């Protein structure tokens, strides 16, 4: 079967290391008619829909892969635009669900936040189907002093390939935040590119995961810091059980002119089985002098002293592991800010931990 590559590093390293991209089998994706998504909103926001490609101004953005991005652009089954007027505020909730009758979902989401606006967008992915496929292209344009927060929970089933292409353009003093809980899918492929064009523009992405069975989670970030005093903060944290795999590729690209910019990226992973695999590549690229850039990566087993202490207090080994893992991922989960979603994510994480092989 022919292979397809996802999440290519913007500056590849040695090929023999086999970490420059994720290679997966090609999917035969059925191109289905349009599909409705569940949506509610409140406040000043306007939500509208379109057919065809509504993201025709992405420049050199290639997403998680050129071929996968073309699918999302040319075969979109649902295009959604969230528009927030100047000084407006609002909340939007979207649910994307696949099923045996609708096993593939390709779509587009565009968020346009005008000056001084504020919007929270909740995105929930659910459902399973043999050969299931989700491929979503997302574009955020944040004008001066706008604040956009996207809170995403992914519960796709174990037969689904889940792909997201996320592109952000940030103007002066704008702020874009992502909080993500990646709990489902056979393969979850997440690509983020952020252009911090404006002075004092800010980007934050905090993501958590618990991998189980043969699950593959692949995170890729490319943040281009162009504006003076721009700020980037990337965190991925989670645990791997059974034979699961996680890849992290994070590139903070400090371009000429971004004086006094600050960028930080951290990847943390707890390894709960000898058969799991974690790869981490935090990169800093720099063409400017007066800035601050930090990167960190950690992967390892649970500290035996912590485990012994909890077990000496009456907890089983799995129970003690669960407490330690939950203490690591809970800050990100709490960032969802929705009690129903928080409890669902915690329940899914606990279930994965209890049933690990």
Image: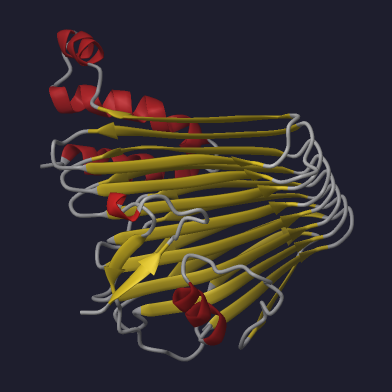
Q: Nearer the viewer, residue 208 or 190?
A: 190
- Residue at horizontal 61 percent and vertical 70 percent from the top: 109
Q: Which residue lies furthest to the left in this view?
A: 357
Identify the image quadrant of residue 30: bottom left
Identify the image quadrant of residue 303: top left
Q: How is the image coloured?
A: secondary structure
Total number of numbered discs in the rendering:
0
Q: Position of residue 346 (x, y in %)?
A: 36, 39
Q: Nearer the viewer, residue 75 or 94?
A: 75
Q: Where is residue 334 in the image (x, y as percent from the top left)?
A: 51, 35
Q: Position of residue 311 (x, y in %)?
A: 16, 14
Quarter of the image where the N terminus is located:
bottom left
Q: In this view, does 336 lie to the left or right of 248?
A: right
Q: In this view, does 312 lie to the left or right of 286?
A: left
Q: Position of residue 94 (x, y in %)?
A: 56, 64
Quarter of the image where the C terminus is located:
top left
| Residue 33 in view here | yes
| Residue 120 in view here | no
Vertical position of residue 342 compared to residue 313: above or below: below
Q: Is residue 47 left or right of residue 306?
A: right
Q: Nearer the viewer, residue 298 or 143?
A: 298
- Residue at horizontal 54 percent and vertical 46 percent from the top: 251
- Residue at horizontal 32 percent and vertical 43 percent from the top: 279
Identify the image quadrant of residue 313: top left
């Amino acid at each position: 079967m022919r292979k397809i590559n996802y999440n290519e590093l913007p500056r590849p390293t040695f090929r023999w290391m086999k970490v420059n991209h994720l290679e997966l089998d090609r999917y035969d994706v059925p191109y289905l008619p349009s599909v409705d998504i569940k949506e509610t909103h409140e406040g000043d926001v306007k939500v509208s829909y379109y057919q065809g490609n509504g993201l025709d101004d992405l420049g050199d953005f290639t997403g998680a892969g050129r071929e996968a991005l073309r699918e999302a652009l040319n075969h979109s089954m649902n295009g959604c635009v969230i528009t927030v007027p100047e000084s407006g505020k609002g909340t939007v909730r979207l649910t994307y669900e696949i099923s045996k009758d609708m096993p593939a979902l390709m779509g587009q989401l565009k968020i346009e936040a005008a000056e001084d606006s504020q919007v929270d967008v909740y995105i929930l992915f659910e459902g399973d189907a043999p050969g299931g496929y989700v491929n979503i292209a997302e574009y955020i344009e944040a004008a001066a002093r706008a604040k956009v927060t996207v809170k995403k929970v992914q519960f796709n089933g174990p037969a689904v390939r889940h792909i997201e292409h996320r592109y952000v353009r940030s103007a002066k003093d704008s702020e874009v935040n992502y909080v993500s809980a990646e709990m489902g899918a056979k393969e979850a492929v997440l690509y983020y590119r952020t252009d911090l064009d404006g002075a004092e523009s800010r980007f934050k992405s905090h993501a958590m995961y618990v991998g189980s069975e043969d699950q593959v989670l692949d995170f890729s970030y490319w943040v281009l810091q162009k504006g003076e005093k721009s700020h980037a903060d990337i965190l991925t944290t989670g645990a791997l059980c059974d034979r699961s795999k996680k890849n992290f590729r994070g590139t903070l690209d400090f371009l000429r002119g971004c004086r006094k910019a600050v960028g930080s990226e951290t990847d943390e992973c707890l390894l709960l089985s000898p058969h799991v695999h974690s790869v981490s590549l935090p990169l800093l690229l720099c063409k400017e002098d007066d800035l601050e850039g930090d990167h960190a990566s950690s992967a390892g087993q649970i500290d035996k002293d912590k485990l012994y202490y909890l077990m000496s207090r009456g907890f089983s080994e799995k129970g003690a592991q669960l407490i330690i893992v939950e203490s690591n991922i809970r800050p990100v989960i709490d960032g969802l800010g929705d009690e129903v979603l928080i409890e669902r994510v915690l329940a899914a994480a606990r279930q994965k931990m209890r049933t690990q092989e």
